[in-house]
Image (spheres, rainbow, N blue to C red):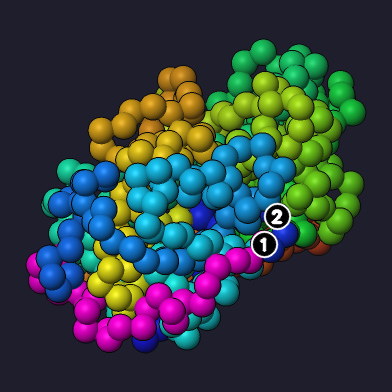
Amino acid sequence: MKLKKVLAVGLVATMTASLAGCGSSAGKNSSSSADSGKASTESGSSKGGLNYKDVEVGKSFTNVKTTIKLFNHRTDLQQKDYNGKTWDQYIADFNKLYPNIKVDVETDTNYAADALTRLQGGDWGDIMMIPAVDKSDLSTYFLPYGDLDTMKQQINYSTAWEYKKVVYGVPSTATAQGIVYNKKVFAAAGITTLPKTPDEFIKDLQAIKDKTDATPLYTNYAAGWTMGAWDAYVGSVSTGDNTYMNQKLVHTANPFKDYGDETHANAVYKVLYDAVNKKLTEDDYSTTDWEGSKTLMNQGKIGCMVLGSWAFPQMQAAGSNADDIGYMAFPITVNGKQYTSAGADYSYGINKSSSKENQEASMVFVKWMTEKSGFSYNEDGLPVAKDIKDTKLDFKDVTILEDEPALTGEEDLLNKMNSTSELNINNGGNDKLQAIVEHAANGDESFSDIMNDWNKKWSDAQSTNSVKVEY
């Protein structure tokens, strides 16, 4: 089994505060034989017929009495002074319907990496946010929720953790890809219309520098994982094609070339290079502070940051100026239209080796979180449950696209290309983004040279993996 490198975009992005661990050991809740939860990937259900669609919140499993453990990345929801709803509050609401199901919560500030280690060791509990494993390994660890066709009727973004038409993950929420910004700073700079192209965006950053005391664009270089966020824009956002990221990118020749129209990956990464090179970012990229940046954004000391919509509520909660925080589409226009890519944030996976009663308790807890808790709405996300439409996000005149999954038989091809090329597109590729910042600040390598190097690495990886170049 291969455990792949972690995804460090919006999925990792909500790791925010200090560790606040809790909960009982997973062993207490997973002591039965693995046979009780083994998946039948042919039917998409577990032995005993446990299916997501058949669970009715408030009616199913009301007699179950047990303790389950939830292992996740949301350390901020463990803090008593968090301005939003905490894990304790969610669980208290859940216990109004299920008083006999105790939910212990453990969070981890280094979740993306630690979750992979814990997954291999088997000591993670009953529910976890699925880390970046190969999809072919999903049935090794997780209980199936149901077949894909059925789950498509139950939830949005059902393909996020699907393998061979069986779904193993239910998204905790869904995020869109854009830019979080301070509306008051933009107004002070004289920006009355949000930018729609890279050129307009750079001009607006210059206006912020010239007319305000705010840092125009904050890179969050030092945190590392925040830099990987830029990869999320090379698919639907910059191409207008929701098949590009997972189906066409691997088959594209020189995908980092300049297309000449401020679109595709080249345009995304050039925004970062130009902003740093023109000194429109923080004075010293090596001293950026992720936690502190949220407060600075709330206080109007930062103009904007390129992060998924998951960051929007965190910036609002970081001070008394929540109304000053806005969220806009990334400034790329394709054939006259702007797009944003929407997809699953971290998804709930249920331990296939947990006891039958713990699997039942976990299934009903996940469905309650999805349908009844209001979690997606509270986190300014897009709804996961099919019958819920409410969201706080508002992209005027922006088309929202959900990336299509990889073609059958190519589910792990992008992982292979990422590993061989070491570019890790949308897969924790922090290093290459940090390198852009370094070279742009030092002026020791041109942007075109960087992109030429990436194209060569991609081409070599295509040859190594015998990938047919079609585009």
Residue plotted at (46% across, 34% down): 377
Residue plotted at (55% across, 68% down): 23
Looking at the image, is 143 positioned above or below residue 292? below
Q: Residues within 10 Å of mark 2 (few under 14, many from 20)?
A: some
Looking at the image, is 106 positioned above or below residue 437? below
Quadrant position of the C terminus in the picture:
bottom left
* Image coords of residue 202 (percent x, y): 70, 32
Query: Which element is circle 1 on?
Result: loop
Q: Quadrant of residue 40 in the image?
A: bottom left
Quadrant position of the N terminus in the picture:
bottom left
* Image coords of residue 87 (percent x, y): 54, 50
Which label is found at residue 20? 1
Residue plotted at (21% across, 70% down): 409
Q: Is residue 131 left or right of residue 248?
A: right
Residue plotted at (31% across, 79% down): 353
Q: Quadrant of residue 21 in the image?
A: bottom right
* Image coords of residue 327 (percent x, y): 58, 30
27 in the magenta segment: yes
Q: Is residue 76 visible?
A: yes
Q: Which residue is mark 2?
A: 17
What span is colored magenta in the figure?
20-45
| Nearer the observer, 325 or 250 | 325
